[in-house]
Amino acid sequence: MKSKSGNNKTANHHWWPRGLSAKWRGVDGGVGVFRHTGDVQRLASNNLGSITNAYQISATKDSFFKAEIESQFDAADSAVPAVVAEIYALMAGSKNKSIEGDGFLTPLINFKHETDLLCVLSSLIVRSPMTRDFFARSFDAVFMFDDNPPQKTGLRDPIIAANQDGMLQAIERRLVSSSKVTVLIAPPNSEFCYGDGFFSTFRSREGKDLNPKAIIPLLPELAVLVSCPSSYLREPKLSTYRMSLDEVHLVNKITSIYASKQLFFRNLEPIPHEEFSIGEFGRLESENTEWITQLIVLQASLSIDGINSINSVRDR
């Protein structure tokens, strides 16, 4: 958390890093925006994924001491180019022996920007509007019957930002120490969609969720499954998994459930779950779905010189 005195000017803060949103530009140079109302637009990537004056922490509106967490998100954003470049290099060489066909989980060894990748993933989870909404609802419920609630005093946003600050540090530590990460690669002629929410069970400010997991659509061509299982082989930390077309559609539908009002796509318009039309952040009825659980079992049991098939889990 960065501290400073003086006034902190109102500004737009990007919860979707511009270095990532730019990678979602389609053939027309724009990014597709599918809204919960059914409207679809093509917009410039720089105009997407921002919020006004959301990361400021201060005791009072005119407090001499002011702090903000934007600098921590800036650190993650600065890591995006290197992470994306290495991932694209990985995909360019995906025909080598390190990556098998559909349904196989294989070790990803010597990924140079592993720590940067974990930093980016933590940042995307914490500053997602979905996470911010969770904290907002929690605090609105606490102060529901208060005569002078944070909504009136101007402290609501700083309280939310303070919680995001603590959560960011906690998740980063947990991902570095005890996570498993799988790069989910989409097949040709398919795309993931991103949203103002995505599948995640990381919700504790202290990072103490039980076996948390998330599927983060990082690029149109790939998403990332990150989990913190209770029991697992320590190495390899990273792996790759080639998806089928049906699995990409499944991830997109799940993303649309956790999103509220916006889904983003490059060229291929997604088919969202019907719940997306409600315009609220949702959740799966059971967040331990069979397919996600199968992949996490593969993650946990993958050895550094092994290859796991999702069919081997299905046949058990």
Image (cartoon, rainbow, N blue to C red):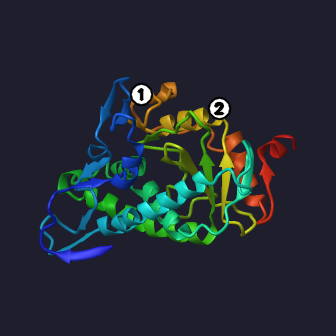
Front residue of 99/198: it is: 99
Camera sees residue 121: no
**What is the secondary structure assignment of the residue under circle 1?**
helix
Q: Is residue 275 left or right of residue 314?
A: left
> Residue 167 appears at what percent x and percent y?
44, 64
Above or below residue 122? Residue 46 is: above
Quarter of the figure that contains the C terminus: top right
Name the residue: 50% across, 55% down: 203
Q: Residue furthest right?
A: 316
Of labels 1 and 2, the one closer to you: 2
Amino acid beneath label 1: Ile
Q: Is residue 173 left or right of residue 167?
A: right
Q: Residue 278 — which label? A: 1
Front residue of 246/278: it is: 246
Disc with the residue nearer the chain's start (1 vs 2)? 2
Determine which residue is flagged by label 2.
Answer: 246
Name the residue: 78% across, 59% down: 301
Mark 2 Cα-neighbour bin, 10 Å: few <14, some 14–19, many ≥20: few
